[in-house]
Amino acid sequence: MEPFENTGQPDWDWWGRLWPTPAATLRRLGISSGDRVAEVGCGNGYFALPAARITDPAETYAIDLNESLLAELQHLADQRGIDNVVPVFADARDLADSLDTAVDVLVLANTFHGIDAPEKVVREAAAVLAPGGRFVVVNWHDQPRESTTVLGEPRGPPTALRLSPDETEAIVTAASPFSLVTQHELPPYHYAAVFER
């Protein structure tokens, strides 16, 4: 399957400008020791690797359609002595067939805007979450792209693809048994919506 629209992997330099402490961001979103976490669209691990450190000894599943990025993630995990991250070559539209265990938290960062059939992915997220599990959507605010600059250049998805927090909530709750439990501002340009099953 093809990747979602406009969800390519940026380099770590500008990720670091947005989230200089990814572990702190994940903790703020409620991820803690012992949580079984899956990150969909993990790329080379900017969030998945710190998530694995937080959740240790529980496993963190790093899910992506790009085998070379998963290989890079595994190499970085090996270098850093992180042995509880599990790379999974899979599509978000087939999560239930790709994970052999239920998870406590499923993170979808910087991807939701590009999904052509978001209801399908939301239903798959619900299928792999344990009862009481949380679905975390991190999204760019619906600001004009030219106003979301990183290192002096406009970044993020095209303006037309961006979703407001209310739009994200409407899509998720209409397609699943999820309800919104909290929302966080993630300056400078993002928000996170945390849903519970």
Image: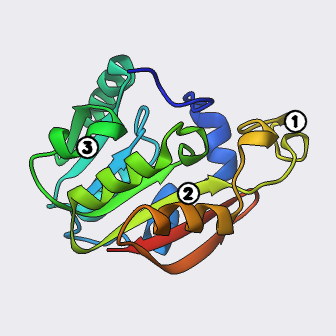
In the structure shown, which secondary structural element does the residue marked by tag 1 occupy?
loop
Mark 1 vs 2, N-terminal side:
2
Q: What residue type is labelled 2?
A: Val
Quadrant containing the C terminus in the rendered view: bottom left
Q: Residue at x 64, y 35 (%)?
A: 13
Mark 3 vs 2, N-terminal side:
3
Q: Residue at x 57, y 32 (%)?
A: 7
Residue 136: assigned label? none
Q: Mark 2 points at which residue?
A: 138
In the structure shown, which secondary structural element does the residue marked by tag 2 occupy?
strand
Q: Nearer the viewer, mark 3 or mark 2?
A: 3
Q: Mark 3 points at which residue?
A: 95
Tell me where residue 177 sits by quadrant: bottom left
Q: Can residue 21 be seen in this view?
A: no
Disc 3 and disc 1 in contact, CB within 8 angstroms = no
Q: Position of residue 93 (x, y in %)?
A: 34, 38
Q: Position of residue 74 (x, y in %)?
A: 27, 30
Q: Which amino acid does label 1 sit on?
A: Gly
Quadrant containing the N terminus in the rendered view: top left
**Residue 65 versus residue 160: which sits nearer the camera?**
160
Residue furthest top in the image:
68
* Horizontal relation, residue 10 to residue 125: left or right: right
Using the image, determine if residue 96 lies above or below residue 179.
Answer: above
Q: How far apart are marks 3 and 2 (CA)?
A: 18 Å
Q: Mark 1 points at which residue?
A: 152
Using the image, determine if residue 58 lies above or below residue 124.
Answer: below
Q: What residue type is labelled 3?
A: Leu
Tell me where residue 81 sits by quadrant: top left
